[in-house]
Image (cartoon, rainbow, N blue to C red):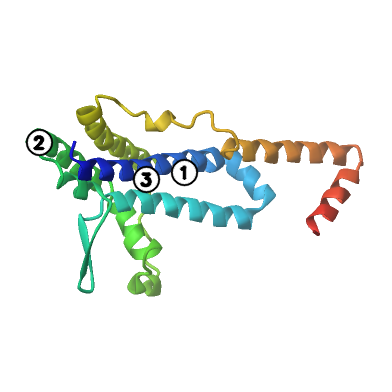
Amino acid sequence: MPDTLKNKIKAIDAEVVRLHYNWKHFKQVFGSDEKVKLLNEAAPVFFSYLWNLMLFDILLSIARLTDPPKTRVKSIIKENLSFDNLVLEIKDANLQSQVSQQILALKGKMKAVKTWRDEKIAHNDLLRQMKEIPLPTIQVSEITDALALIRGIMNAFHQNFNLQTVWYEICFEHDPGDGKSLMYHLKYGFDASREDYAKFDMRRDHEIIEWLKD
């Protein structure tokens, strides 16, 4: 593998790992109606803000992977860390054709994501805002399909050059301190609070209120 391609693959691989890590956390916290109900009981304003931050970061990460190889900023041309950039480094015609087809399939799944990136997250489209034109709905299946295609593209490189498959979707199954930990402590706190109220024991409630003043 040429050094230039190896370095680019290493850099984009770190982005793909982070993307899957963030998607795992998002599902752990917001992945069911029961969890969302618990979050709304706890702090609806804060968790609505967190939902937007996490989702926007995920959509941006996906969109950046499908950016063109280069971007012109005034008179300066800068390379983008994207799949199209990697394709330019491939010398093997069969691999280049395989990866190019996978990238096209990914871009086909990206129409709604790209609209969100271009007209809401990275930029505020004036006409859409003034006319209150709703953004397209993004289904969970669209994100999971896009992630599967991203894994396929990365593993085309890994299998060709390293003779291995990277299981991005299960890399962090046993990560301590993740979204599951947050939900556990929220659920535990609500259950303990209800028990205290049932026993008319407000000592813990008063202690926590005092602690929050600091």
Residue at point 20% right, 29% down?
160
Residue 22 got which mark?
1
Residue 15 got which mark?
3
Q: Label 1 neighbourhood size at 10 Å, few (<14), some (14-19), many (20+)?
A: some
- Given residues 5 and 208, the one toward you in this image is 5
Residue sitting at the far top: 163
Taking the image as shown, residue 61 lies to the left or right of residue 176, namely left
Closer to the chain start, of discs 3 and 2, is 3
Q: What residue type is labelled 2?
A: Asp
**In this figure, which residue is indicated by the disc labeled 2?**
92
Closer to the chain start, of discs 1 and 2, is 1
What whole-number distance in Å separates the C-alpha atoms at marks 3 and 2?
24 Å
Q: Are marks 1 and 3 in contact (CB under 8 Å)?
A: no
What secondary structure is found at the residue carrying circle 2? loop
What whole-number distance in Å separates the C-alpha atoms at marks 1 and 3?
11 Å
Q: Which amino acid does label 3 sit on?
A: Glu
- Given residues 81 and 211, the one toward you in this image is 81
